[in-house]
Image: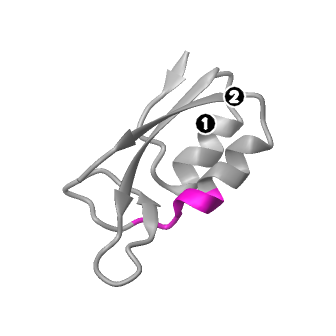
Amino acid sequence: MWEHATNSKEKLQQALQSDVHMIEADLLLRGAGDREPIMAHPPETDSDINLQAWLTEVSATNKGIKLDFKR
């Protein structure tokens, strides 16, 4: 079982607490400057969670991941 588009803290927490085996999220570089990797799917271009925080949360579980890199 998969959870798709876990691009926010809320959706990620729901997925982590569920019975799904795999979690999919979309990765996008935020704006100009440092171009921080965030979890978002265009047309959304901002998020309340960045890649580092997302990976930290998921790595504490035994769930698999799939990252979809967006431009």
The residue under label 2 is 63
Q: Residue furthest top?
A: 1
- Amino acid type at circle 2 is Lys
Sequence order check: which comes first, mark 2 or mark 1? 1
Q: Is residue 9 magenta?
A: no
Q: Residues within 10 Å of mark 1 (few under 14, many from 20)?
A: many
Where residue 53 sits, quadrant-wise, is: bottom right
Which of label 2 and label 1 is nearer to you? 2
The residue located at (69%, 43%) in the rendering is 58
The residue under label 1 is 15
Where residue 68 sits, quadrant-wise, is: top left
Secondary element under disc 1, as helix, strand or loop, is: helix
Q: Position of residue 30 (x, y in %)?
A: 35, 70
The residue located at (54%, 57%) in the rendering is 51
Q: Which residues are magenta?
A: 47-53
**For residue 28, side relative to residue 4 (left or right):** left
Using the numbered discs, state the Cα–Cα distance from disc 2 to disc 1 in whole angstroms. 10 Å
Marks 2 and 1 close (CB-CB < 8 Å): yes
Q: How many marks?
A: 2
The correct choice, above or below, for 20 with respect to 24 in the image is: above
Q: Residues within 10 Å of mark 2 (few under 14, many from 20)?
A: some
- Amino acid type at circle 1 is Ala
**For residue 41, side relative to residue 54 (left or right):** left
Q: Is residue 51 magenta?
A: yes
